[in-house]
Amino acid sequence: MRDLGFPYKVAQAATPLVLPHSSYAELFRVTDVLVGLLRRTVLEVAPSQQGRVEAFSATARDYPLFIEDQVLEERYAHVMARPDVIVGPTGPRFVGFNISGGFGGTVEAHCRYQAWRKIYRQENGKLPFSYHDPIASRANLFVDVVEELAVPPRLAWVGALREHVEYPDSARYFDLDVDHLTRRGFSARYFEPEELEEAWNCPPHLRYHVGLRHINVPDWEVLGIDIEPVRKALDHGLLLLSTQLSGLLSNKLTLGLLSEGRSWMSSAERDLVDRYVPWTRIFTERHTSWRCEQVDLVPHVLAHRERMVLKRGIPSNGRHVFIGKDIDARTWQALVEDAAIAGTSVVQEHVPTEKVPLAVLPGPADEPEFVEVAPVLGPFLFGGRPGGVWARFLPDGGTGNLATAPTATDTVVVVA
């Protein structure tokens, strides 16, 4: 697990989590349907990319990497997804979606699976569980893309080590993917943004036409990383996945629109959303439905603080997620009033997490202890294919915003 981002000085899982086949398959089936509904929701908002961005009260600065070919932009917006799933009292609830080429967990989960394979392999070479490898599944997606576009199997893996503050001098996070792709027959290379001109300003047989956009635009802006080399590479024909439209699919306002219901949805689609997505609304001064009655949204959210979560629409690694029950009433009121004016956030019903027992190692020399933990599951879907399930949790059994918790750690889900 060296150089993969989590601070491994904290307690660690001593085993994977285990699901039966039916529950494991349910995560991917529902993910696939919901991602498709999110895509249609965005496409229906407006016919142009500019109109869609404006409909979400955003600007070109928020979404700067659209390509000119709108068909390709729409075709490859949803090919990589990792929802955040909480298992509540009524089953799995999809509280948010990461749809892009830059979400975390793929490499971490791959390495966790490799660790459990070595530990649990039996004398006959077999394993007592099964799973899907996320790196292999993502590579399979690119096999399809290269064939579909009829381009040479040369892949540009684009990222920035400066994002990974825990290991800024090691490229292992990206090298693991590049090595796997090379073994699969690709000519793959990792590029820092400043190196990207080498991907297109070269002899035709050395050019890269497709690659991974492992980029989180808000994070790059905070770190002062120039996005212009990526913009220039796109303009010169390098198709990086997922395309920029994926950012609107991930925007929590889209989930709010879907939760509220769209006129084109079938009754089966409405039932699925009601079952798997917690009540979510775009947060402004307005009336909306709550449990079969109309409510004035802002007073309702103020009065039910402990049942609500306030989230900014554009994902920011959990920095703008506020759980009402963990915040005092005065702070909550200020957050609610500001969000209602801005109109760029959603409010979501809080889902209490069902805890499960997990063996945890408090320290590297300690014996494992069973702890009741509250995991957030992240099923990976690449081109519609399952790619395993990442699971994050607090090793002390706590709940809260895992994205900003310094002691958060992870494991993976296997099938037995």
Image (cartoon, helix red, strand yellow):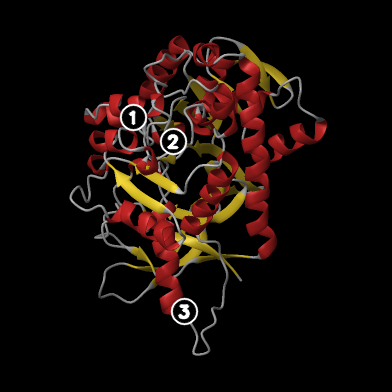
Tell me which amino acid carries mark 2: Leu
Tell me which amino acid carries mark 3: Tyr
Residue 91 as seen in the image, left or right of residue 320: right
Viewer-nearest of labels 3 and 2? Answer: 2
Label 3: few (<14), some (14–19) or many (≥20) C-alpha neighbours in 10 Å: some
Percent of width and height locating residue 46: 61, 13
Image mark count: 3
Percent of width and height locating residue 305: 49, 28
Q: Is residue 261 above or below residue 326?
A: above
Tell me the quadrant of the picture where the N terminus can be found.
bottom left
Tell me the quadrant of the picture where the C terminus can be found.
bottom right
Name the residue that disc number 2 marks.
240
Check if mark 1's residue and mark 2's residue have beta carbons within 8 Å.
yes
* Residue toward you, 305 or 120: 120
Residue at image coords 68%, 49%: 29
- Going from N to C along the chain, the mark reached first, 3 or 1, is 3
- Going from N to C along the chain, the mark reached first, 3 or 2, is 3
Name the residue that disc number 3 marks.
120
Q: Could you tell me how far apart the alpha carbons at marks 3 and 2 are, in whole angstroms?
A: 37 Å
Residue 227 as seen in the image, left or right of residue 141: left
Assign a secondary structure to mark 1.
Answer: helix
Residue 329 as seen in the image, left or right of residue 271: left
Tell me which amino acid carries mark 1: Val
Assign a secondary structure to mark 2.
Answer: strand
Q: Could you tell me how far apart the alpha carbons at marks 1 and 2 are, in whole angstroms?
A: 9 Å
Residue at image coords 23%, 31%: 223
Q: Is residue 286 above or below residue 386?
A: above
Name the residue that disc number 1 marks.
230
Percent of width and height locating residue 296: 61, 13
Residue at image coords 66%, 19%: 44
**Labelled disc at residue 254:** none
